[in-house]
Amino acid sequence: MEKKMMIGATEFTFDKGCGEYVGKLQVWGRETDVFLDTEHAEGDDIDKIVTEKINWIERNKEKIMKAFMEENDHYVDVVNEMIACGDFKADGPISADDFVNALFVDNVTIWVKGVDTDFALDLDAKPDYLLGHLAFMEIDNQYHVEFGGLNG
């Protein structure tokens, strides 16, 4: 297995600990950790597939946020209750837009398998409206987005 690979102009290095290639790419305006599982790639054009998936994430922020908020809009009320009780520092109550605008992609994992490639990302928030957790979003090879739970 190669120790390094290039995705566009970005170098990815194989990490024996996790068994994946690791690099950083821009996602939603932030430098983001990207993990590539190429175990089942078998000659696939990895660069093309990874670029396609990252570009899809860039173009579909609204779809990803909608899938997250469909199951998690109650967190706005949770955070507002914490603000009212003094358990969360903020200037005042937050709106759903404030909550969504605080979210960003912490990392992306892509399981490269040709046309069957699927991927996932962890959403984080600043301020920490997810209370120390990451929101795991799963995207299948047909680009269906599903909230997979909270991590951490």
Image (cartoon, helix red, strand yellow):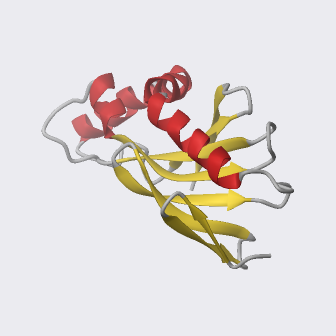
For the image shown, how many numbered marks are present on the structure? 0
From where the camera sits, is residue 135 visible?
no
Vertical comparison of 17 with 10: above or below: below
Query: Camera-side residue: 71 or 52?
Result: 52
Give how far across and how far down residue 61 sits, in percent: 45, 30
Q: Residue at x 63, y 53 (%)?
A: 47
Q: Quadrant of the N terminus?
A: bottom right
* Picture coordinates of residue 120, whole percent (x, y): 64, 44
Which residue is farthest left? 91
37 relative to 149, above or below: below
Residue under the image location 60 percent in, 41 percent down: 53
**101 left or right, relative to 107:** left
Q: Residue at x 73, y 79 (%)?
A: 16
User: What residue sits 23% from the left and 35% below the top?
Assistant: 84
The residue nearer to you, when weighing 74 against 151, is 151
Image x and y of residue 101, in percent: 31, 34
Q: Quadrant of residue 104?
A: top left
Classify the position of the C terminus by image quarter.
bottom right
User: Which sits in the foreground, 76 or 29?
Assistant: 29
Is residue 131 something that shows in the picture?
yes
